[in-house]
Image (cartoon, rainbow, N blue to C red):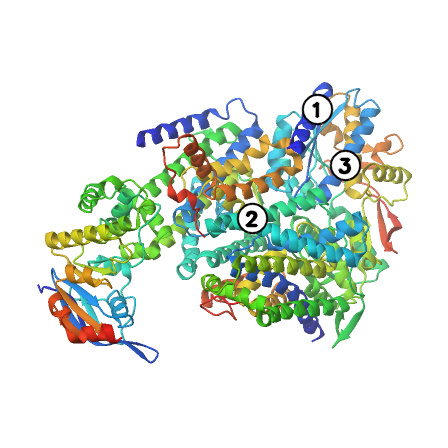
Amino acid sequence: MTDTVLSIRNISKSFGGIHAVRDVSFDVQKGEVLGLIGPNGSGKSTLFNCVLGQLKPDTGEVRVNDQTVAGMRAAALNKLGVGRTFQQLSVFPQMSVLENIILAGQEHQGTMATRLFGPSDAGLTAEADQMIKFFRLEHLRDEMAGSLSYGQQKLVDAAMAFMAGPSLVLLDEPAGGVNLTMLANLKDRLRAYNREHGTTFVVIEHNMEFVMSLCTRIIVLAEGAIIAEGTPDEIRSNQQVIDAYLGG
Amino acid sequence: MAEFIQILISGLSAGSIYALAAVGFTLLWQASQTINFAQGEFVMLPAFFVLALTVKLGLPLPLAIILAIFLSVLLLGAVFKKLVVEPMIQHGTLPLVIATIALGLLLKEGVKEFYSPLGQPFPSLFPQDVLSVFGAAVSIPDIANFVIAMGTIIGLQLFLARTRTGRCMQATAQNPDVAQILGVDIKKMVLYTFLINGALAAIASVLITPIYLAKFSNGEVLGLVAFIAAIVGGFNQIRGALVGGLLIGVIDNLSAGYVSAEYRQAVPMLLLIFVILVRPQGLLGTSEGRAV
Amino acid sequence: MIRKATLLTASALSLMAGLASADVRIASVAELSGAGAAAGAVWHDGIKMAVEEINAAGGILGEQIDLVEYDSQTDPQNSRAMVQKAIDEEAFVLMGTVYSSSTVVNMLVAMQNGVPQITGSESPTITAKGNPYIFRTAFGAQKGLPKLGSYIKDDLGASKVAVIWANTEFGKGGHDAFENVAASNGIEIVSDIPTEQAQVDFAADVAKLKSSGAEAVFAYMTEEESARFLIEAEKQGLGLPIVGDTVIASQKVIDLAGSAANGVSSHVGLTAEAPIPAIREMAAKFEAKYGYGADHNAIKGYLGAYTVKYVTEAVGSFDRQAFADKMHGLCLDAATHPGILMDACWDDTGELSRESFLVQVVDGKQQITKTLPAN
Amino acid sequence: MKRAHLILALIGIAVLILAPIGQKNYIIYVLCSWLMFSIAAMGLNLTLGYAGQVSLAQASFIGIGAYITSLLTLAGYHWVFGWLAAMGATFVIGLLLGYPALRVQHHFLAFVTLAFNTIVFLVLRNEEEITGGSFGLVGMPRPEFFGIKTMPQLNFYYFVLVLFVISAFVFWWIVHSPWGRAFKALRENPIRAESLGVDTRRITLLAFAIGSAFGGGAGAIMAPLVQFIEPGSFALIHSLKILLMVVVGGAGFFYGPMLGAAVVIILPEFLRFTEGYYLIIYAFLVIVLMVYSPSGLIGLGSKLMARFRPKQEVRKDMAKGAQL
């Protein structure tokens, strides 16, 4: 059993004549919190979508837990142990917080038949309550998710990503639009989850402060290629990175 | 051969009227995401304005037609937007769809109860003379309908492309946010769209009713045809709706003539399903962006 | 609000008036709304006029008639419900419906409850189902069309005919009956064109007729569709004699089609233009009362209501079963029963026999060309 | 909370059991008709209200169910077989109709289903050999169970009531099961649902198939209820009528379609004094309702309750109706 959760090998992707990603390779180990940063148009979103199977790379391969994700639908990828959050708000607004979180776990329980004929919570109420408690959402448990504040919805979104016990979670700009207090809370919870469950995170984020304080390792992309890789401290002092950001 | 030409010409003549209704339908969709299930009734109603004005009030026909167009612009344009579309637009599309279905019912039942449940003859605007074209009978009203309908649509196209107001309307349809930033009075532009739809419906009504006769239930057929024409042609293009209208007119007639009279209604429906599945943006539509 | 209140008061008043004189209840179940309102409303007006006359003359067996209307909305299912409602409310006899597609459904309920039903429908199937409670006010197409067969064959000299018909219960009935007639008269059907209900565009259909090689056209559609067809036929210069049954030469079609209706010939069971003083008188009175001309449906309703009076008086009591039994094989002559307008006989299926007419439209008017004997 | 729901349901059933007693046949017939349409509307409520998939073809499924049941019972089979065959066939056809929904959404889907409805009508009318064409099929027997005839109107009512209660229970069970949660997730955010392991393709098809099967079940009741069917009863206009029932009642609410069906089927009885104006008034009220409460009568009810009990917050989602 290898400890490599995500393995990216020689990924290239171009749109028309523009090379969005050029020959990128890296591995992510179990328990790592990897930050993927880069200026706008650096190719990090394209790379992210290749990992999610939503874009088919021109060359190269993405493997999660030793399986290739090429041509895999999102639901199948999720069954493989990949959870994700979204850049935009992505809760189910007309369902309660509890229902949102149960939904996130139910497809991993039993079969289609047991999900029809079995208990209506798929046996997940206790587990969901734990998750709600973990994210400190107890007082909102039965509220409609759509009526929550932006930051609270981000927490619900994260809780959903974790509900099925994934081995890899992809966080797409988790800090965007969240106020400072809530951001500290979110960061604290993500760290705690990583510590307790050893789940691997890959984070795309613009908020440097957030990335630097959350991640254990950072990869910097510019013009579709990796220009730097290292711990937050190493990245902070890397001249190439500073040039890429400032020079445009 | 004469039969084929006859069917083709009749199809084009009917299709040009469908195109008018379809263009209005498309305009509303672009400007306000309104799917107007009452569009058929919008075409049915102005003919009754004309009848009420000529038969009940004794006005001369040309005056009655002008007044009817004015009334349509007012009621089917401004009032429809103000009282039905505007309060509902923020609720999403479905409640508005339901409301337009109900509005169609309201107009239909209203005409039936307050005017007549019976079909009514409608005065023709043109002499009834018939010309022979390669053995096919083409009447002056056929030609006039085609010319007026095409002229109206081309005029509308020119208005949208060549005038400042028209370009503002296009901008509003394509991207309301940007249009607003550029200082376009979006509300006014959307209102203009509704007014134009009212006028188009009235013109279609006055052209088609001498042939179809004025009856409260006429909208059922016309509304359906307008949908199909708009979607087949391309929901986001005026010329799409134009081509869609002509195409459906011709295909309807050809299928009645050569496929099966019993299944004539099925042919446009199958075309509709085919287009939606294979080319959802319509034959002439572009897949992204909305353009007038 | 005011309108609502007025309606409420009006209906309350009529209810009280009804209660005060509710001696014998006759239910008119008709197409008062929906696609068939043109036929049903006129039928109902015909009944109403007859009932007022009967009541003014002392009613039936001295009892006043309480006429109650039920709107089928031209929906067969709803017509079934309305017949059930009428029976629940103890109607003595049912009048209606006019559309055959409704009558074939609701007559089952009337039969199950043993209530006589006087229908305005002309579809052949109605009397072919062995229902002992159904009676016609106009004979079925299978009786009318043979009269037309010999006209097409002998008078028009046509042996190749095209048929254009409405693809509905009504049109299909006429179409099938005409097929039989054509077969027995040695007429070849060279083109057979079904059309849709509420069809507006007849261009392709007429083009097909034109190239079919037919020598005459038999058209069997409802009013508006007939008119649209005639207009298109005139436009394309069809140039063939057009014959039909009742509808195509009706005043409504003539009004709608204008000059395009000229030259159409038709068999007509009942018409306001019939050379019979009683009918002319009834039609004049009808027009004065309602402001529009009486058509065959108005006459059917009118004489239907009188039929109820005469049959009940022949029985001598308000007995539904006796009413139905009496009417089978009954003949009423217009001389002693003026409200029946023309001599009429019912056979043991409830089918009707009566003289009828051949008419032609000349200068926008129906002209009787021939009176045809009852068969 | 759950107990309150159960009590409410039991009271409802008790009222339905008592409702026809002492009533004339006509009223009982109207009640049967209401229960039947409620079942059909329930199905559409699942497809549209819960799963968010627009279907304008529910009448065609009632039609398919009614024709299958009629043909089988007229051929001498017991009604139960007709019922099962009707539900089975409409389930499968519903699956097929669901396929376009995987490609297109919203208004496009609405038009595909609209076209489907028209084609079904034409087939029912034109394939005379099987369906009886425009003459329709007549004289379907009412079934007999363990020696009890359902021919008398009151017996038939209880027969329909039993089917209604079964259908309502099945519906309730589905929407409260994890499937129901997946349907709602599909309606609210299909992309998020897919990323959480929900097989949205399968769920979409199931939403159509199950909704259609309810339509087929309603058709199986219509055949012996009316004892006559003809293609015109299943035309597009009737699909729109059922759509109105669902949305007017409240799409996505358990009791919504029953209420909506009552408004369309039963209310005209009480508004008889309005004569021909009934439809005009109805259409007008629907427009007004959509302006004030796009989530239908149930939403309106909650709004009014909230006004009297200002402390209780109105569900946010009430502000926004189901989306096309």
Counting from the top left corner in percent of width and height, residue C191 is at 70, 63
| Residue kind at label 2, given as amino acid type | Val
Residue at disc 1, secondary structure: helix
Which one is in front in this view, the residue at disc 1 or the one at disc 2?
2
Can residue C82 be seen? Answer: yes
Which one is in front in this view, the residue at disc 1 or the one at disc 3?
1
**The disc label shown at residue C13, or none:** 1
Q: In the picture, which quadrant includes the C terminus of chain B?
A: bottom right
Residue A212 versus residue C224: which sits nearer the camera? A212
Counting from the top left corner in percent of width and height, residue A108 is at 22, 51
Residue at disc 3, secondary structure: helix
Q: Earlier in the sequence, mark 1 or mark 3?
A: 1
Residue that label 2 marks: B84
Q: Are marks 2 and 3 on the same chain?
A: no
Chain containing the residue with disc 1 = C
Residue at disc 2, secondary structure: helix
Which one is in front in this view, the residue at disc 2 or the one at disc 3?
2
From mark 1 to mark 3, how far is it between C-alphas?
A: 20 Å
Q: In the picture, which quadrant includes the N terminus of chain B?
A: bottom right
As drawn, is C196 to the left or to the right of A205?
A: right
Chain containing the residue with disc 3 = C
Chain containing the residue with disc 2 = B
From mark 1 to mark 2, how far is it between C-alphas?
A: 37 Å
| Residue kind at label 1, given as amino acid type | Leu
Q: Height in image: A63 above or below C296?
A: below
Crowding around mark 2 (Cα neighbors within 10 Å: few <14, some 14 to 19, many 20+) is some
Residue that label 3 marks: C45
Can residue C330 be seen? Answer: no
Q: Are marks 1 and 2 on the same chain?
A: no
Residue drawn at 55 percent across, 44 percent down: D287
